Image (cartoon, helix red, strand yellow):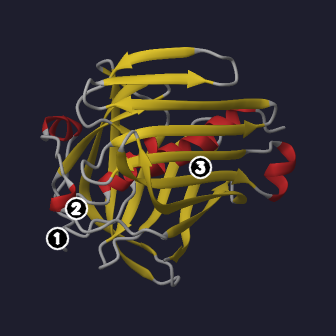
């Protein structure tokens, strides 16, 4: 019987995708499988701060669909969309929605219908507001976090249990979803790594992603293509986060499509999320 732990693994697929996936229009097409990047080197890399003037416009209207497989079963679907631009706290912001759901056999055993909405400042490219609406079996959670980037405070409110919390945030912090879209703007190159501060579950995570090599993986056409191998590391309060082993692949082609994420979990063996369609 699939119970709450399956929800955790499924949600991990979503969070992991947000952390390590993204196309990089500024990236270099360097192909070199001889280099490796250690965890210590990833931790030593300087974080990058971009603004709108450094980047191309975001792909408003883009829709990415990922198929989630668990134990070789088609377990669910994750859809990520850039819906448009709205006013948030007096700032123009991209509205980004991510939905995650179980399907078929897995849906009957443990139903998941989750929706996450993020608002990313058009000019500063950091998060302004993050909403989560989770329906996982009997579990329900509706919550919102408003980010005061000027005063470095996050104000969290859970509408389900009425709890509230205010906590400190670093400069230009991202939420789980905007971290992925911010990463899309960073240059990818074998032998380098990048760092992003991301808030999730009322905590701030220090995320580092290393790019040690190029590998061949299946693309949207079904044919194998070159892809950057991305290896993420996360720390919270100085402690390394250990939630199973995971890595991802991003195309080295012009589109920089996020092709695949692989999660090795101790109980549920392997979960994968593969890109199956891109619409814009």
What residue would you read off at disc 2? 188
184 to the left or right of 31:
right
* Relative to 60, residue 109 above or below: above
Q: How many marks?
A: 3
Say which residue appears at 16% left-offset and 46% top-offset.
48
What residue would you read off at disc 3? 270
Say which residue appears at 80% left-offset and 42% top-offset.
110
Q: Are marks 1 and 2 in contact (CB under 8 Å)?
A: yes
* Relative to 271, residue 7 above or below: above
What residue would you read off at disc 1? 28
Q: Which part of the image, by quadrant, shows the N terminus?
A: top right
Residue 149 found in image quarter: top left
Residue 190 visible (yes or no): no
Residue sitting at the far right: 108
Between disc 1 and disc 2, whose residue precedes?
1
The spot of residue 47 in percent (x, y) is 17, 41
The spot of residue 244 in percent (x, y) is 49, 36
> Disc 3 versus disc 2: distance between alpha carbons?
26 Å
């Amino acid at each position: 019987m699939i119970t709450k732990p399956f929800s955790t693994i499924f949600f991990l697929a979503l969070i992991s995708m947000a952390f390590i996936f993204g196309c990089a229009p500024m990236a270099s097409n360097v192909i070199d499988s001889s280099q490796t990047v250690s965890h210590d080197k990833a931790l030593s890399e300087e974080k990058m701060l971009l603004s709108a003037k450094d980047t191309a416009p975001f792909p408003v209207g883009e829709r990415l669909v990922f198929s989630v497989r668990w134990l070789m079963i088609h377990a669910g679907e994750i859809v990520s969309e850039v819906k448009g631009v709205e006013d948030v706290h007096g700032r123009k912001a991209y509205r980004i929605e991510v939905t995650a759901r179980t399907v078929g056999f897995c849906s009957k055993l443990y139903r998941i219908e989750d929706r996450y909405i993020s608002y990313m400042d058009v000019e500063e490219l950091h998060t302004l507001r993050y909403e989560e609406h989770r329906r996982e079996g009997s579990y329900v959670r509706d919550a919102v976090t408003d980010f005061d980037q000027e005063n470095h405070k996050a104000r969290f409110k859970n509408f389900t249990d009425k709890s509230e919390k205010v906590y400190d945030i670093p400069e230009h912090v991202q939420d789980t979803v905007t971290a992925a879209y911010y990463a899309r703007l960073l240059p990818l190159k074998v032998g380098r790594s990048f760092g992003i501060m991301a808030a999730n579950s009322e905590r701030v995570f220090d995320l580092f992603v290393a790019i040690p090599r190029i590998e061949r993986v299946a693309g949207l056409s079904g044919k194998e293509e070159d892809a950057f191998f991305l290896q993420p590391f996360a720390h919270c309060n100085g402690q390394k986060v250990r939630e199973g082993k995971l890595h991802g692949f991003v195309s080295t082609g012009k589109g920089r499509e996020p092709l695949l994420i692989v999660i090795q979990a101790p109980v549920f063996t392997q979960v994968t999320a593969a890109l199956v369609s891109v619409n814009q």
